[in-house]
Image (cartoon, rainbow, N blue to C red):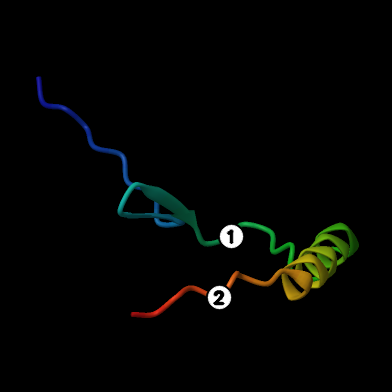
Amino acid sequence: MSAVNKTDTNTSYSGGATVVKNMKSHANDPFFVKKAAQAKAIVSKLTLPESDKK
């Protein structure tokens, strides 16, 4: 008896991740837009200490 391999045309595998072509985008979702703006504001306030270059 031979094994049957089922293939899905909407799914691809890249490295260890599964990429689904018909997944909903959250690019314009108000929750994610707000969180991204908050993250950008926090990162813009952060500064790294100057390192001594010898």
Q: CA distance from mark 1 to mark 2?
A: 46 Å
Above or below: residue 47 compared with residue 24: below
Q: Residue at x 69, y 64 (%)?
A: 25
How many residues crowd mark 2 within 10 Å: few (<14), some (14–19), many (20+)?
few
Look at discs 1 and 2 and give the one toward the viewer: 2
Amino acid at the residue labelled 2: Glu
- Of residue 11 and residue 29, the one placed in the foreground of this image is 29
From the viewer's perspective, tell me whether residue 10 is left or right of residue 2. Answer: right
Where does the C terminus fall, quadrant-wise?
A: bottom left
Q: Tag count in the figure?
A: 2
Viewport quadrant of the N terminus? top left
Q: Secondary structure at mark 1?
A: loop
- Give percent across and percent down for residue 53: 39, 80
Identify the residue under disc 2.
50
For disc 1, the marked residue is 22
Query: In the rendered view, does 14 fall on the left or right side of 39?
Result: left
Q: Which mark is residue 31?
A: none
Quarter assignment of residue 40: bottom right
Left or right of residue 49: residue 27: right
Query: Label 2's element?
Result: loop
Residue 23 x %, y %: 62, 57
Front-lying residue, 4 or 54:
54
Label 1, residues with CA under 10 Å away: few <14, some 14-19, many ≥20: few
At x 34%, y 47%, the residue is 16
Front in this rendered view, residue 22 or 33: 33
Position in image of residue 9 (x %, y %): 40, 56
Q: What amino acid is at disc 1? A: Asn
Question: N-terminal of the two: label 1 or label 2?
Answer: 1
